[in-house]
Amino acid sequence: MTNHWIIIASIYSGRPDPRWEITERQAEHFMILWHKAPPSAMDVIIPSRSGYKGIRILAGEQQFLIYEELITCIEKKMRTSKKDHQRTIEKFLLNTAPEQIHQVLKQLNVL
Amino acid sequence: MQLRLTIDIFSGRPNPSLVLSVADSKSLLKRISFGRFKKQTEESEPFPSMLGYRGIIVEQFGKKTKTNIFPRAHFTIDYVYADNLLAPSKSLPDLESFVFDRLNFFEEPKGFRSFKRDLKRKIDYFWEKCPRWRDKHRKIYPELLIDFYKKIRFKSCFCAPLPDLSAWNSNQNIQWDNNCYNYGTNYRTDTYAQPGDASGSMYNDLSACSVPSGNISARMGAVSDGLIALSSNNNTCPYPGHLVALVVAPDSDYHWYRKGRNGKWSHKMGWSPATLLDDSGDPINDPRTADRGDYTDFCTFMQVIHGHFKIK
């Protein structure tokens, strides 16, 4: 497992989206949630809209996309998708955001 | 004869439904009325293909009744649809109250705890939004279809980029690493370009379109990159180059739209796919009047001349 887990909350249209790093323990907890999640036949679709558009996780060769109760893992062009019931995993990750980003997410009603 | 009621509300998952007892089925049939069925044509009232609640489906099975109802009839506002036919009907409110009287007998959809609570709100929303949707559909859809397929003879903005949504949307890396500024200027950098970054004068104040002296707005950053502000432009194509529009979500973000060769506007929101529609799902004829969500401040139209600007 990679040491660096970067979380990107997709919010903006022009300026760079807020990003932060999660700890090893948080990453382990995320992986437990990911393994427990039931499979989904549908992949995450990134919406063409303004405002919050989900989360992107950069973890070495793996990338995860999370939006609307779905998670898609992309690794070497292979996609695996799972369900994120009641946005449990998404909320867990958003709550790891530093205080300043947390405030922005609250203002945008993401949290 | 028995009836099954289905609340038509979901798009992917199965809709909640309830099989009625024979007595309840008879009681419901007395509440339903409709006019003469006619074949659906292009002129017919379209079925409201909206997201969320869309009406109630009544299906009959078992021994046929004398009442001339189709095996599967979809009741929505003012009409009932069945087998490519439609008939006027004002029965939906009665059906809805019938459903609410028996809502506890419907199985709660999995993972949707507040379904019953939300249903009333969704029904109210549908009654409010559906007439406007139909009106809009009637007005714009045929024209949109013709426009979508027609060959462009007269190019209203002949220096503008070709319609190339797929060039930005079909490759994951291109889509994710280019934002509205890249798309607006039609300049792929794969760096999530920022106004003013290439020219050493990147914006530092997004509070509004105009910022206090000493600060740098997104507009100033773009001008520094080589875009030309057209303060008096009224949505007309410049020559040479193409037209873009800058808007700001105060204290939050900026956004760009671009006018295409056929005169239609499009945009790309961050790492999202580029699109022709605004936040309400409408085509964008003028970014000043489009539904822009939080991007409330319209700043200016600007001119982009290929080879005369640099972004990064």
Image: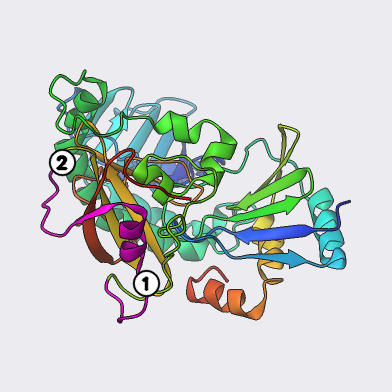
The residue beneath circle 1 is: B216
How far apart are labels 1 and 2 at the CA level? 27 Å
**Residue shown at 18% from the left, 33% from the top:** B157
Relative vertical location of residue A20 with respect to residue B187 in this rendering, above or below = below
Which picture quadrant has residue A90? bottom right
The residue beneath circle 2 is: B237
Q: Residue B248 in magenta?
A: no
Chain for mark 2? B
- Three-letter amino acid code at the position of disc 2: Cys
Residue B101 seen anywhere in this rendered image of the structure: no
- Three-letter amino acid code at the position of disc 1: Ile
Considering depth in this image, is B160 or A69 the residue closer to the camera? Answer: B160
Residue B14 x, y percent position in the rendering: 56, 40
Give SS at disc 2: loop
B22 left or right, relative to B242: right
What are the residue bounds of the magenta stretch?
A: B210-236
Residue B102 seen anywhere in this rendered image of the structure: yes
Task: Determine contact: label 1, label 2, CB under 8 Å.
Answer: no
**First along the sequence among labels 1 and 2:** 1
Q: Residue B232 in magenta?
A: yes
Which picture quadrant has residue B66? top left
